[in-house]
Image (cartoon, helix red, strand yellow):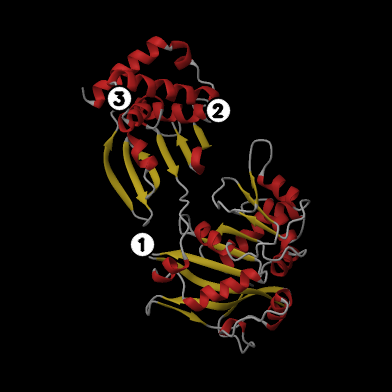
Amino acid sequence: MDKYQLVGEVQEAVIKKHRKLFLDSEEGVWEKKEQVIKQEIKTLLGREDQDIEQYTVDQLIGYKELGPYMRDPEVTDIFVTNLEVEIKRSGGRKEETSIRFDSSEDVMKILHNVVQKAGRKIDFSNPLVNVQLPGGMRLNGVIYPNTTTPAISIRKFPKKVYTEQELLSQGFLCEEMLQFFQYAVKSGCNMIISGVTGCGKTTFARLLCRYIPGDERVITVEDTLELGLEGVVALQESKKASIKDLIENSLRMDPDRIILGEFRGDETYYLLLAMDTGHYGSMSTGHSNNARMNLFQRILRAAKPASGMTDEELGRHIVSAIDLTVYIKKYKDGKWCISEVNELTDNNGRPHFREIYRYNRRENRHECLNSLTSELLDRLQEELGEEKLPQIRPFSLPKTARGVVSLV
């Protein structure tokens, strides 16, 4: 008996024996359904076969043909478009697969399975759904009348922790930059890490968090728990408490630092408040096309509704709160690296970006252009106490800035 025949027999057997259970769509019964399916497999085979068990679970109440890709640690994204399946691996390029569903109904079965597990529903009245899946994955689904065939986008958040040596060998940053970031984090630079979707913002933030002194109280706030840090207070968004609510509440929890997974809206303003009221070393990630004007405007637009300030007032607040902006770029050939690091400074009420590091694509190397300003250097040295900043250019006495961009 091949596994396809087995699925049909198991389906008939389990529904006949456990009809009431398999008609129940409540969230709490899904694990029971899996157990029943696996037990029927063992009974029919007379032995245990985890591959067939998992395949059958996928077919009856799971992701069907998408199941193997859901479990593949190298796959970061799965897309179902026009009944065909594409995937994206950790290298960043999309790949076509041989999977093609026979009908929209087959794709709808996957959507119904997933959204019911999450206690949600998708139908003509609710054609859009965005749900969190076990393991920190996220699924977005769109059906008729908003699309002719059901569309599924699944984003997986890899838990891989890159070592310093791996990032150095890939050219993600250079050894001097690594030392720079170690001391920038240790001494409490407030930082925003930016880039496009999937460029490695969270991966880099996870690395930076390793350099936070172990005796500090750190609170992380995320919509999906991606950072996976140990020894922190990890807060996650829910229907009962938004990201904004959690950031506000975290300020009452006596944190040394607050790490916001990604800034999007009102929570941005409360993170800026934390950064500007002594919670040095706080950080967040955000989408942008560079670490300068585009990022600054995105922060301003996100924070403005909650701030009640004019653009000029809020702009000064942003400059006062943020020390460093980092931009991670993913190139078409799959290479990803830090392309620029800037110190955000004030010049008569206007933001300026002082380039600290820049990636020279032509020569395939990172270049240090300037040191930090004396004002920031003094603060960092004060935070370090008796320990001295290393003798590398970013921590040397400032000279005339070479790469300064003003936001007019």
Secondary structure of the residue carrying numbered label 3 = loop
- Residue 47 image label: 3
- Residue at the (46%, 36%) spot, across then down: 141
Of residues 298 and 227, the one drawn nearer to the viewer in this rendering: 227
Of residues 131 and 183, the one drawn nearer to the viewer in this rendering: 183
Q: Amino acid at mark 2?
A: Gly
- Residue 40 image label: none
The residue labelled by disc 1 is 334
Crowding at mark 2 (Cα within 10 Å: few <14, some 14-19, many 20+): few
Q: Quarter holding the N terminus?
A: top left
Residue 297 picture quarter:
bottom right
Tell which residue pokes out farthest to the front in this image: 47
- Residue at the (76%, 53%) spot, across then down: 251
Image coordinates for residue 152, horizontal then vertical, percent: 41, 37
- Residue 119 image label: 2
Q: Are marks 3 and 2 in contact (CB under 8 Å)?
A: no
**Is 97 displayed left or right of 308 in the figure?**
left
N-term mark: 3 or 2: 3
Question: Label 3 to label 2, Cα distance in Å?
Answer: 34 Å
- Residue at the (48%, 42%) spot, across then down: 137
Mark 3 or 1, which is nearer the eye?
3
Crowding at mark 1 (Cα within 10 Å: few <14, some 14-19, many 20+): few
Mark 3 or 2, which is nearer the eye?
3
**Is 192 displayed left or right of 116 in the figure?**
right
Residue 400 picture quarter:
bottom right
Secondary structure of the residue carrying numbered label 2 = loop
- Residue at the (78%, 63%) spot, across then down: 277
